[in-house]
Amino acid sequence: DIGISSNFERYLYYLFGCDAQRLAEKMAGFKSTGKLHVERRELEVARQDFASGRASEQAIAEAIKEWDKQHNYTLDPHTACGVQAAEQLRKTLQWAELPKHEMVVLGTAHPAKFTDSVRTAMGRPPVMPPALQMVQNARTRFEVLANSQQKVREAIEQTVRERESGKAQPCAAVCFSGVRRLLF
């Protein structure tokens, strides 16, 4: 369930003073009501720990274009949104005035995944990595395997051998279906 991030639940664990029982109760309540109630002091701590920003489609496109011109670096739209939010926070939280304060924005995707958006922003498409170019229009290979760790291992090893020998055709994805549990 990606709707409730384990990182968020871990954060709450520390916010609740490492009280696992309280966390379990709060998460059960959240699951049933969709609401998470915290004490005022916990809310204040959380407000100190988090800040947020936003960016319009236009601001995202402007960030992509600006970073291309100023830094010769192509941002994907998600990272451009993060850059815009970071710049907002730098101003509103006065981070720029802190001594030795650096800001890091982690890239979240390759710009080639968003060719249309990047082309619109920069006037040209992003550079496509050779590995992505190779599989861009390749077929998808699909195999149904028995629900067996050994069968999955054999299929993966066979695929690797084929790729290493040059016998395998490029494919966009190799999907092994029917496996519920895979432990190596």
Image (cartoon, rainbow, N blue to C red):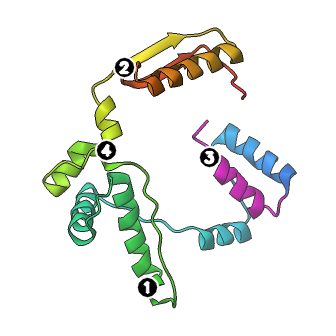
At mark 4, the secondary structure is loop
Q: Which mark is residue 169?
A: 2
Q: Which badge, 1 or 3, comes first in the chain's sequence?
A: 3
Q: Which mark is residue 129?
A: 4
Q: Closer to the camera: disc 2 or disc 1?
A: 2
Q: Which badge, 2 or 3, comes first in the chain's sequence?
A: 3
Q: Are marks 2 and 1 in contact (CB under 8 Å)?
A: no
Q: Quadrant of residue 70?
A: bottom left
State left or right for residue 119 relative to residue 85.
left
Residue type, numbered disc 4: Pro
Q: Tell me the magenta residue range.
A: 1-18
Residue occupying the point 64% across, 8% down? 146
Residue type, numbered disc 3: Ser
At mark 2, the secondary structure is loop
Q: Which mark is residue 5?
A: 3
Residue occupying the point 33% across, 61% down? 55
Q: Which badge, 2 or 4, comes first in the chain's sequence?
A: 4
Residue 32 sits above or below residue 153 on the image:
below
At mark 1, the secondary structure is helix
Q: Are marks 2 and 3 in contact (CB under 8 Å)?
A: no
At mark 3, the secondary structure is loop
Residue 41: x %, y % from top left: 73, 71
Residue 17 sits above or below residue 94 on the image:
above
Q: Closer to the camera: disc 2 or disc 3?
A: 2
Q: Closer to the camera: disc 2 or disc 4?
A: 2
The residue that mark 1 highlights is: 96
Q: Closer to the camera: disc 4 or disc 3?
A: 4
Residue occupying the point 82% across, 64% down? 17
Location of the N terminus (image quadrant): top right
